[in-house]
Amino acid sequence: MDQSLITKKIIANAFKSLMQKESFVKISVSEIMKTADMRRQTFYYHFQDKYELLEWVFKTESKENISDLIGYERWDIIMKQIFIYFDREQDFYKNALAVSEQNGFIEYLYSNLKSLFSRALDDIYHTADKENLENRNLITSFLSHGLVGVIKDWIQSGCEISPEAMAEYMYTDLLNKMHDKE
């Protein structure tokens, strides 16, 4: 791992630890860098502002916790990993969801879930057929938007249901019931 990425991760971890306790608007770059035990100027070598840092966290962690697993794990296992991750990081994401000025979390999550569902539905729909491709794209979009909403509501409610139960419900109960209706 190169030094720049290591530094970005240290800054991001400091930022995330602060956001677990206080809202995004109350956190300053100076506070982030004091928590990271680095000079304030180092922040600006890597990020323009705290909005860019927030976006970087979304992008990086979405990739690490969803995108990088696609193709290596079964999608039901990835679903469980997603819920475990958001349960562990719920305080950060509660505050991140409250950022109204600029909130890339929903977009990054949607994009990554769409990739996940697209891959899962490849087994059902053959992309060579144009009609099946359109059906798959519609279903992928529907499932992705739905799961984003479920995850958002679940985080905002304090992750009252265990991540394992959420994953089980989403994968086994809901999707199997949909499949049985066909």
Image (tube, grey):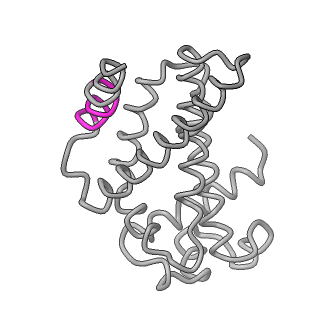
Q: Residue furthest front?
A: 131
Give the mark count.
0
Give how far across and how far down residue 61 sits, in percent: 57, 48
Q: Residue at x 29, y 53 (%)?
A: 154
Q: Nearer the viewer, residue 1 or 79?
A: 79
Residue at image location 34% in from the left, 26% down from the top: 178
Q: Residue furthest left?
A: 160
Q: Nearer the viewer, residue 129 or 16?
A: 129
* Location of residue 93 with respect to 146 vertically, above or below: below
Question: Does 20 sit left or right of 120 as displayed?
Answer: left
Which x, y percent locates residue 141?
A: 55, 42
- Give me the residue at 59% from left, 26% from top: 70
Q: Quick check: 2 left or right of 163?
A: right
Q: Quadrant of residue 177?
A: top left
Q: Main secondary structure of the magenta part?
A: helix
Q: x and y percent of residue 132 in the render?
A: 62, 23
- Asked whether, in this view, residue 155 is left or right of residue 98, the answer is left
In x, y percent, where is residue 149?
39, 54
Q: Which residues are magenta?
A: 164-172
Q: Quadrant of the C terminus?
A: top left
Position above or below: 18 against 3? below
| Magenta stretch holds residue 171 | yes
174, above or below 84, in the image: above
Q: Residue at x 53, y 65 (%)?
A: 14
Q: Does the segment drawn in magenta span residue 82?
A: no
Q: For residue 115, which quarter of the picture?
A: top right
Q: Is residue 21 left or right of residue 4?
A: left
> Quadrant location of the N terminus?
top right
